[in-house]
Amino acid sequence: MPSVSDRTIVNALHLVPPQRWGEVHGYLQTLTLPSTPIQTAADLLNSGLVSKPAAFVASRRA
């Protein structure tokens, strides 16, 4: 991965609409966690990187 300066990151953040800052913050928090490779759909669902589909959530409650 090429080197990226903090200025480049800040400039990119300025392009993100304020309504999406929560998403950005959540994603940045995931980058501070120990890295565990995502190998399965279950890994992805449990990673917090994507929202669980309503059908999946409903099936877990039943």
Image (cartoon, rainbow, N blue to C red):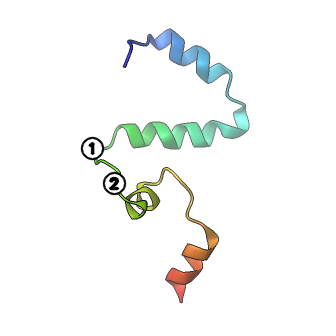
Q: Quadrant of residue 17?
A: top right
Counting from the top left corner in percent of width and height, residue 32 is at 35, 38
Give the residue drawn at x 41%, y 55%: 47
Q: Quadrant of residue 13?
A: top right
In the picture of the structure, the residue carrying the numbered disc 1 is: 34
Q: Residue 31 vs residue 20: left or right?
A: left
Q: Residue 14 vs residue 24: left or right?
A: right
Q: Is residue 60 above or below residue 54?
A: below
Give the residue drawn at x 53%, y 38%: 25
Which sits earlier in the primary sequence, circle 1 or circle 2?
A: 1
The amino acid marked with disc number 1 is: Pro
What separation in Å lies between label 1 and label 2 (alpha carbons)?
A: 15 Å
Disc number lying in front (1 or 2): 2
In the picture of the structure, the residue carrying the numbered disc 2 is: 39
Give the residue drawn at x 68%, y 22%: 15
The 10 Å Cα crowd at callout 2, few under 14, some 14 to 19, many 20 or more, is few
**Which structural element holds mark 2?**
loop
Q: Residue 31 vs residue 50: left or right?
A: left
**Which structural element holds mark 1?**
loop
The amino acid marked with disc number 2 is: Gln
